[in-house]
Image: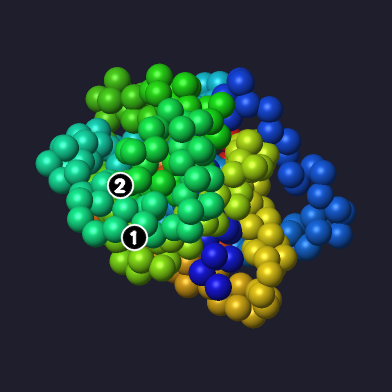
Amino acid sequence: MLRAALLSLLLAIPGGPLAAACAGRNLLDIMPADQRKQIDDAVELLPYGRGNFWRAERGETLLHLVGTYHFDDPRHDAVLDRLAPLIDAAATVLVEAGPEEQSQLKSEMTRHPDRLFAMSGPTLPERLEESDWQALSSEMVARGIPAFMAAKMQPWYVAMMLGIPPCAMPELADGADGLDARVVERATASGIPVRALEPYDTMFGLFEGMTPDEQTDMILTSLAMSAQIEDYSATLTEAYFDEDVRVTWELGRLAAYGLPGNSVEEVDADLARMEEALMNRRNRAWIPVIEDAAADGPVFVAFGALHLSGEEGVLALLEREGFTIERMQF
């Protein structure tokens, strides 16, 4: 059943920029009305299910929190113009990974190539069926990655690469930046300290705990989505700018229900475990970091938009800590 959870995860996390060369369709616009209603109804039941920008107050403590899309889009420029005065007024800006963490990450990958490449054990052609390996190598070549290099990549890294449409790879190679990077650039230019919400190697730990079978399943799930990856990318991007990114998680849930051999109960259980491991656990760890920074004055916090919503989302956790939450114009 892990494949069902991974399908929803890969659909819900923004996997790549939608470059001008891409021509994906927004799947939410063309799905049957009853299915769209099912998704919308599920989001309505969640705390803070919609919205990208929020204000949180508790006594003299003031936070502004923005959910981000990690990849480039020209619409980010207008958003940053609206956010800039609050960034400039902050005592601290918090992001998932700041310049120091980015530097540490690059150094880590140089010193420890085994983070991204398997230095021992079976290669992907040995772990996959021949037909699956041929399909995978073809997809990786389409993204500019030779098959011999893909063969030794860590499975989670391969799965993430498959989440980027081939049409978007040139833009990604040019270093196009999302809202997170724009926030950091503005804060740095304004002399505002930038701190990280978590250690630079957090994401490695999330995937390295998977078993070999789970990692193989992750690749197979990504391959199953590859034919529609431009559509998924378009759907994610538009949902974000509609301030409705949580619908992508529920879209993944609905798609998982339709996979052979899945029951609703099993899919829901898998998704709950995935959300706990990859989102909720991180959300809870961020709260003390946010509160510690707030002791020095107003804080501006930017992180992936999917972390905002839900019973264990950042906003609900802050509310339980006594903060009053108010949605702001994005």
Foreground mark, 1 or 2, reads: 2
| Residue for point 34% across, 38% down | 148
Circle 1 SS class = helix
The answer to whether residue 48 is above or below residue 24 is below
Number of numbered discs overlaid on the protein picture: 2
The answer to whether residue 56 is above or below residue 280 is above
Horizontal arrangement in the rendering, residue 136 relative to residue 40 (left or right): left
Q: Residues within 10 Å of mark 2 (few under 14, many from 20)?
A: many
The answer to which of 252 and 259 lies nearer the viewer is 259
Horizontal arrangement in the rendering, residue 267 relative to residue 67 (left or right): right
Report x, y in % for residue 96.
34, 45
If you read the primary sequence from the N terminus, does the residue marked by circle 1 or circle 2 appear first?
2
Callouts 1 and 2 close, C-beta under 8 Å: no
| Residue for point 61% across, 72% down | 267
Q: Residue furthest bottom?
A: 265
Quarter-wise, where is residue 226 in the image?
Answer: top right
Work out which quarter of the rendered image holds the C terminus and state it: top right
Q: Is residue 209 visible?
A: yes
Q: What amino acid does circle 1 point to?
A: Leu
| Residue for point 26% across, 47% down | 117
Q: Is residue 319 visible?
A: no
* Residue beneath disc 1: 206
The answer to whether residue 22 is above or below residue 258 is above
Q: What amino acid does circle 2 point to?
A: Lys
The answer to which of 60 and 109 lies nearer the viewer is 109
Report x, y in % for residue 8.
58, 58
The answer to whether residue 25 is above or below residue 314 is above
Spatial separation of the CA atoms under disc 1 and disc 2 = 20 Å
Report x, y in % for residue 301.
39, 43
* Residue beneath disc 2: 152
